[in-house]
Amino acid sequence: MRVMSERESARGGLRERKKRATRAALAEAAVRLAAKHGVEKVTVEAISAEAGVSPRTFFNYFASRDDAFLILDADAAERIRLAVLDAPAELTPLHAVRDALADELAEAEQQHELWALHAKVLRTAPDLLVRSLAAHVADETRLAEAVARRLSPGSGGPEAAAGTGAGPKDAEERRKALDLYPRLVAAVATTAVRVSVEHWSSRPEEGSFADVFRRVFDLLAAGLPAPAHV
Amino acid sequence: MRVMSERESARGGLRERKKRATRAALAEAAVRLAAKHGVEKVTVEAISAEAGVSPRTFFNYFASRDDAFLILDADAAERIRLAVLDAPAELTPLHAVRDALADELAEAEQQHELWALHAKVLRTAPDLLVRSLAAHVADETRLAEAVARRLSPGSGGPEAAAGTGAGPKDAEERRKALDLYPRLVAAVATTAVRVSVEHWSSRPEEGSFADVFRRVFDLLAAGLPAPAHV
DNA sequence: CCGATTTTTGCACACCGTGCATGTTTGCAT
DNA sequence: ATGCAAACATGCACGGTGTGCAAAAATCGG
């Protein structure tokens, strides 16, 4: 069994860095070529050539050609997860997730060049847009774990949350809720981002993205009341 | 193809009925073969043979092999949409959608044979599960339109909802909300179904699906409050 | 620098997905 | 009924996708 050295664990070692670089290069090459020639005209061979690896290597990083277009920054989800864990304790889970997402999205807007191309590509390929959002949904489980950890800081996860405090019946109910609630918060927050992006990009004249984003989370926190009753 | 000599124009013409039958036969064949031999071992050739059409015809109905596994009943979304439009006016949009979904899901449970196979197939292929849910998301726009129509029955859609009652500033705000709100309700409701299914199928011992479903919508209607503060 | 481990690559091969030409079925008007 | 036009199914050819396998190259720890 291999033991990591000090230097390697510091920032992941050369191997891991190279792998990240290769993956990023493939994703960037895919997006740039797609923005230039159209998604359907981009072959795995062309992407690989642009990134400087063999076509066979492409499939060591992406399970399918389309996957290369779905996620630009594979580490964003991890940063969001850590931000949720570090959020002030007085925030509700929904608001902690909201703020973490808002920060990440604000940074993404600054590196606008590649992100703009990515958005352009996904805009011309609706099915890929859906799949891209679905791909982010796959990270939802880890986000749900972070939410669960916020709720019971002492435990290693949602599994070990039972049997503290109230009577056995309340504890059982609480355990169920803790299992379901984090998933729901993570899923709804992801959905909120999607709806915000879709709405904002279809009607940019109705306010900034931050506006839309805030309105969406306000509606969620209010329980989606019927507008007539607001 | 087999000859199906029946009365003409009974409902929608023979052509349309045959197309529906062919699509349903292909989807059913795909699911049954996948349940028997595993998703990855099922070729387009095998599906087509089981359904009694040529492999080339398969691609006249599904854009890709995987698409045949994603949606069993292509008409369910339309039924849900109509149920939302017909729901009692006193229900909030969220509850109208909830009830429509609950009815449809209850019916699906009764025709359990094929649906069980479908669930089994998707359970062994997580990526297909995500894509299946994403495929349903594609129907979300129509559901959002139905929600919008509930909110302004007289109009043809969310566009013409301005200018009733309050001052111009309120009207503007209300128009924005009406555009965003239906999308959000539809998206969140779809997400709620997904989370309910995933949670229930991963922990079937923690209650019936209807229980989970109800708990999820209760949490949503309450604005996803922090459990510790409940 | 060496041995062990990981990654890349070439090659072979099966399957996917599409354009096109062709034959067949359906709907409709006569 | 009969014939015509549109819609549909099919066979064929062909390029792109995706995988198993084994050899070569790169990296890591010592």
Image (cartoon, coloured by chain):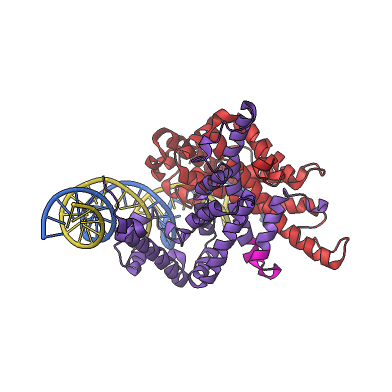
Chain colours: A purple, B red, C blue, D yellow
State the image coordinates of residue B221 (x, y, percent, origin top left). Answer: 72, 44
Q: How many marks?
A: 0
A46 sits to left or right of A137: left
- Decide whether the magenta segment is chiefly helix, strand or loop: helix
Picture residue at 85% right of the left edge, 64% below the top: B163
State the image coordinates of residue D20 (x, y, percent, origin top left). Answer: 27, 45
* Observer able to see residue A88: yes
Q: Residue furthest top?
A: A168
Q: Quadrant of the N terminus of chain A?
A: top left
* Observer able to see residue B74: no
Q: Give the magenta part as a residue range.
A: A198-211
State the image coordinates of residue A180 (x, y, percent, origin top left). Answer: 59, 39
For residue B37, which quarter of the picture?
top left
For residue A68, which quarter of the picture?
bottom left
For residue A171, which quarter of the picture?
top right
In the depicted structure, whether residue D4 falls above or below residue B124: below
In the depicted structure, whether residue A72 falls above or below residue A166: below
Q: Nearer the viewer, residue A162 or A68?
A: A162
Picture residue at 67% right of the left edge, 53% below the top: B184
Q: Nearer the viewer, residue B221 or B142?
A: B221
Q: Nearer the viewer, residue B17 or D20?
A: D20
Q: Is residue A225 magenta?
A: no
